[in-house]
Image (cartoon, rainbow, N blue to C red):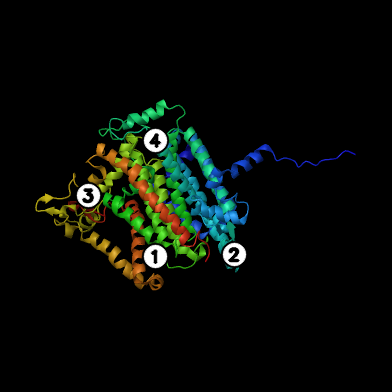
Amino acid sequence: MDAIKDFVDLLANPQVFFGATFGALILIVWKREAFASNRWGWGLMGFLGVFFLFGLFDENFQLIIGKPDNVPIVALIFLLVFFTWFAIREGVRNDRRIAAGEPPIEKDEEDRVWTWPDLVYTELIALVVCTVIIIVWSIGLEAPLEQPANNANTPNPSKAPWYFLGLQEMLVYFDPWLAGVVLPSLIIVGLMAIPYVDKNPKGNGYYTFTERKAEITIFLFGFVVLWSSLIVLGTFLRGPNWNFFGPFEFWDIHKLEPLTNVQLSESIWVYGFGRALPEHWFIREIFGLALVGFYIGVLPVALAWKGLTKYYEMLGPTRYYVSVLLFLMMLSLPIKMLSRWVFNLKYIVSIPEFFFNI
Amino acid sequence: MADTKTIAPRDPAFVRAWDWLTETQIWTSIFRHTAPINDRNRVLVMLSNVFLHLHPVRLRKSGVRLRYTWCMGGISFFLFLQLTFTGLLLMFYYRPTLEYAYADIVSLREHVPLGIMREMHRWGAHAMVITVWLHMFRVFMTGSYKPPREFNWNIGVIMLVLTLLLSFTGYLLPWDQLAIWAITVGSNMARATPFLGYEGPGAALLALGDVRLIHAAADARFALLGGTIVGEGALLRFYVLHCVALPLVIGFLMAVHFWRVRKDGGISGPL
């Protein structure tokens, strides 16, 4: 029993957890034909159910899962797994039909039905079911109320509301001006840009995967892997001092994590050239600035020339640069995570003089 | 031979009562037509009822399938109504001041037998965040943001942000440790806003000589909180945003959103 728990704690480590979620996405997309079977869907849901049931017998697991405000995230895990599977399944089913020369299922359901009764009754039933769920949930679980607010008593850990915990998790890798302001704004801008940069006319109004491979993979990567799995990580697996704790691990406030992170400038000047850091910030950070300049200034152009030429020609310059820049911004998070895990890299550019750290 | 008389069977009492009721002047003044049991009335019911007229008279078969819609948009709207209602009831008992806020929540918990209004409001709010996300997920997976629905997708993204802001502003109101520190963590981000936050890059550039224009008592975070810490100013600001400003804006956008669903060709489907 304890061996299983230790093993799960090990798997829940941010590196493994993030790697596994990303790996799962690749597998799902690649082996979607097999994934779309009912056996996989119910198997996954059953596995999750058994895991949570098993966990409930553990005191530490109970403590974190049973926090009233965390209950919705448990529901979110189940719902998200189910709907990801379901959407892929419906896509695969339609893809099979399209491959066989038939129209998608939605095309066959094109004829009109009366709103009364077909739609209003469905709405009524949904309304009743939702009301019942909310009432039962409200009777069964009391809303949390802690001690009165006290500015002098900081809880450890201090967490934002659960839907922002993905962003709070980003603070491990980025400074607040990026993790808390620039990147969230770019998420909103990016979402709004989707209909304007996506010129693919196919897949409008029906489930499909094959006709929209890139779009769906990128969206799933952003929504499921980056946004949702980081929320789960930030909620369940981050304890005192924002240290990592496995789901079955005791939240020990004295847990020590070595902080051995270095700046890029340090590793180049001090460890590479064997000399002291230059006085002036610009010379000190020139390599980092060059790297960032390359990433947002040169890389999109280079990719248009070789690698993504197809997309450049298809989208035209404006759409191409907007979408590639947004995509690179999204990738900056996993890049920063990887460089932290592999090279202990803290900042690529570090100019504390101006609060400017990347 | 005695005469035999055939007597037509009388309708059961409740049918007669129903017939009488639906023929009264009061009833017919409210409902201009009889029950939607024939095609003509199925049209009329959608056209003459202000609540139902959000709907088209008829729609694609795939549009009423849970398989296609997941019902997430409708559930989000329903949860919004539910939250408006329970929120209104909570407003009768809650005063947004440092003195009373926490005490009022305690009273709600301790003095109301079987009271679940606060629970319904809180769990409904959490549920709405999830259903809005899933609605966006469904719309993406069916490619429903594609022309001609680009603009409506954008309205939706703004409403997604507003949903999170509504939840965030409401999180502070119980004024307990959970509330104040969650908002502290969240709003601390604002002081790192480039140029406009006092710890943000570029803020030092906004200065007249030696006088900084952006400092702890004049920056983005201060504007959000109405103070340098999460205190009385923040509580009042969040209360007004939560109960008045944000619901008004999201309600307005909802009207646009639903109207555009209709104007952009109804529920999406293969072209």
Badge number at residue A104: none
Per the model, the C-alpha gap separating discs 2 and 3 is 54 Å
- Disc 2 element: helix
Type of amino acid at the residue the image marks with label 2: Arg
Residue A304 location (% of width, % of height):
35, 71
Q: Where's residue B52, x and y in %?
A: 51, 51
**Residue for badge 1:** A196
Foreground label between 4 and 2: 4
Q: Are marks 4 and 1 in contact (CB under 8 Å)?
A: no
Q: Mark 2 near mark 3, Cβ–Cβ under 8 Å?
A: no
Residue B197: which disc? Answer: 3
Q: Which mark is residue B90?
A: 4
| Element type at mark 3 | loop
| Displayed quadrant of residue B177 | top left
Per the image, the residue denoted by label 2 is A97
The residue nearer to you, when weighing B73 against A118, is A118
Which one is in front in this view, the residue at disc 4 or the one at disc 1? 4
Q: Tell me the CA gap for discs 1 and 2.
A: 28 Å
Residue in the foreground of this view, choosing between A192 and A322: A192
